[in-house]
Image (cartoon, rainbow, N blue to C red):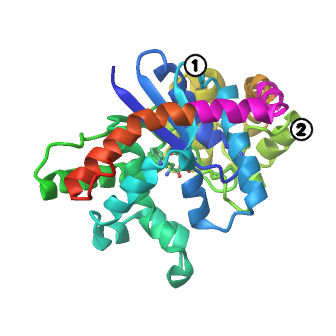
Amino acid sequence: MQRVLSGIQPSGIPTLGNYLGAIRNWVPMQDDHECLFCVVDLHAITAVFQEPEVLRRQTREMAAALIACGIDPDRCTLFVQSHVHAHHRLAWIFNNVVRMGWLNRMTQFKDKAGKDRENVSAGLFIYPALMAADILVYKATKVPVGDDQKQHLELTNDIAQKFNHDYGVDYFPQVEALIQGVAARVMSLRDGTKKMSKSDPSDQSRINLTDDADTIANKIKRAKTDPEPLPEHVSGLEGRPEARNLVGILAAITGTTPEGVLREHGGQGFGSFKGVLTDALVSHLEPIQKRMQHLLTDPNALDLLLRKGADRASSIADPIADEVERMVGFLPRR
Ligand code: TYM
């Protein structure tokens, strides 16, 4: 069975982008792959200062959200990244494999650092080496992610290849990015050229998985559109990023294609289309929200699940980290 790993930052409530671009695609993989999913708290402290209490709360909320979306701790390994120390161990080694020039080319770093490069954390810069360690410390070969993670996975392969070359081994496999579906890149509701993101300062730009019906209705109503009615065919979405985004969201949430959505709604104005989209979102998200709320009533049970997940993850990762440290020339502890 092929090993799958993916992760999500507990830096806020998961958005519809996280759900449609990643989490929802993880769920069916549990049937026929060995899956590991982690809440990446080590990554969450790289971009902005996280209040400790908030980080703790958001880590639990993210775990609860994943379970509520169908990630089943009995059929996969669900854990918190910082609990499995092998991630830190391999990340340090990879910090010394990765080249500054490679990290300098990372578009996510450039986007997040903006003009303030001198003032962002060193952690934000070396983030991709930690991400490579997250995957390779399990020798996972499949990584289901949204479109924005593609460059990080190419870098993971560069790191694996350079490590193998430097140490004269054929140890780390190449990993495959699985970027699936019409919603691999869900865009902001306020600007169809910008990714929907947990960290966007405007809450109006995103649907959070915990938004109630009124909030969803309000955000969709205010979502940016253009004055034309919806086209009859996908080719008519060209140059209309906001329309394309809303059509893509409805297609993903109702399990159809943009063509299918336009067959039904082509020619309609946005007023009625937004009503349909709101209803579809509310009825899809409501059961997830109920499950999430229920899980959060018992944080101890959630913590126990996560501890068990971390033990299982460590039992795979520790021997791999041991072996890598031996290859590098560190004296064995035992
Ligand atoms: P993060 O927390 O930003 O996002 C989690 C997942 O959601 C996807 N995603 C989206 N997909 C479609 N449209 C969007 N607007 C959108 N926004 C986010 C992301 O592509 C991702 O799959 N670096 C990663 C976390 C990570 C990781 C890993 C992932 C750390 N280690 C190892 C895979 C393997 C991140 O910041 O994801």
Q: Name the residue at the front extreme.
A: 334
Provide residue 126's location: percent of width, then percent of height.
42, 66
On screen, residue 1 above or below 15: above
Q: Secondary structure at mark 1?
A: loop
On screen, residue 5 above or below 195: above
Provide residue 156's location: percent of width, then percent of height.
32, 51
On screen, residue 266 above or below 134: above
Image point (47%, 62%), residue name: 108
The one of 130 and 199 positioned closer to us in this rendering: 130
Provide residue 267's location: percent of width, then percent of height.
65, 31
Provide residue 136's location: percent of width, then percent of height.
34, 44
Quick one: quadrant of the N terminus? Answer: top left
The residue identified by callout 1 is 74
Left or right? Give the position of 70 relative to 275.
left
Specify the quadrant of the image occupied by residue 261. top right
Left or right? Give the position of 44 relative to 217.
left
